[in-house]
Image (cartoon, rainbow, N blue to C red):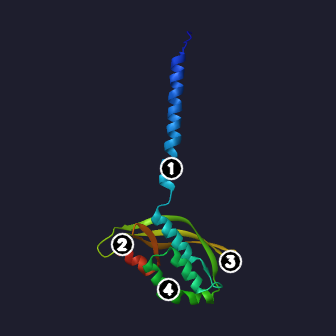
Amino acid sequence: MKRKEFVIRPKHLILGLLVFIAVATLGFAIVPQVISNFTTPKPAEIAAREGAQAFLSTDFEQGQDAWVQNVCKVASYEGCTIIKQTIAPMLWPSVERGEVRQACQAIQSELLTDTPASDEKAHSQVWKVTLECVDAKTAKTNTGDVNVLVSEYEQSWKFDLVLFTQENQNDKQQ
């Protein structure tokens, strides 16, 4: 049996090493950027997550005004107005009756609809946000999904409101 010999010349070895270093350098420079483009939350997603967290994080001991203030920090002007005038007066009595104290954290989100801006409406998106909520009294954890409407105002995304069952159905029909 004949043995084959491969002779690697020093110039080929050096050239191969240089190519390897160039490819590795490009890989380390480009791959993290590509990965971050896919994993970094978009501004609308951040608005949806922050809005859902603020909306569902309630503490009856701190009171309705503190809750409204926390939600309005991340909400659009229109969203804050709806919270103050409609949702808070309707929702808060049941929070007090149930002595609800919970802190919620968004753990996942998914874009459901994207509605471009029109003459009378801002660019809006509906996100399904999965939250993990911890009851402050019992430390019991609950996980659930809410659909959240966010809109773009002056190139900034803001939370508008959590969509309830009827609003979700209306949104799907449009």
Q: Is residue 92 left or right of residue 99?
A: left
Residue 134 on image: x %, y %: 65, 73
Residue that carries the numbered disc 4 in the rendered image: 84
Q: Secondary structure at mark 2?
A: loop
Q: In which quadrant is the N terminus drawn? A: top right
Give the residue at mark 2.
Answer: 122
> Residue drawn at (63%, 77%), measured in percent from left and top?
102
Q: What quarter of the picture does the C terminus occupy?
A: bottom left
Residue 139 in the image: above or below residue 63: above
Pair 1/2: label in front: 2
Looking at the image, is mark 2 or mark 4 earlier in the sequence?
Answer: 4
Amino acid type, mark 3: Ala
State which tag comes first along the sequence, 3 or 1: 1
Query: Closer to us: mark 4 or mark 3?
Result: 4
Residue farthest to the left, as pictured: 119
Q: Secondary structure at mark 1?
A: helix
Whether residue 21 appears in this view of the structure is yes
**Residue 146 vs residue 71, the one in the foreground:** 71
Spot occupied by residue 136 in the image (x, y as percentages of width and height): 68, 77
Location of residue 170 in the rendering, given as x and y in whole percent from the top left corner: 38, 78
Three-letter code for the amino acid on which mark 4 is drawn: Lys
Q: CA distance from mark 1 to mark 2?
A: 30 Å
- Crowd band around label 3 with a 10 angstrom C-alpha radius: few (<14), some (14–19), many (20+): some
Closer to viewer: mark 2 or mark 3: 2
Say which amino acid is labelled 2: Ala
Residue 27 sits above or below residue 136 on the image:
above
Q: Residue at image x 40%, y 66%?
A: 155
Disc on res. 136 = 3
Report crowding for label 4: few under 14, some 14 to 19, many 20 or more residues within 10 A (C-alpha).
some
The residue that appears at 50% across and 44% down in the rendered structure is: 31
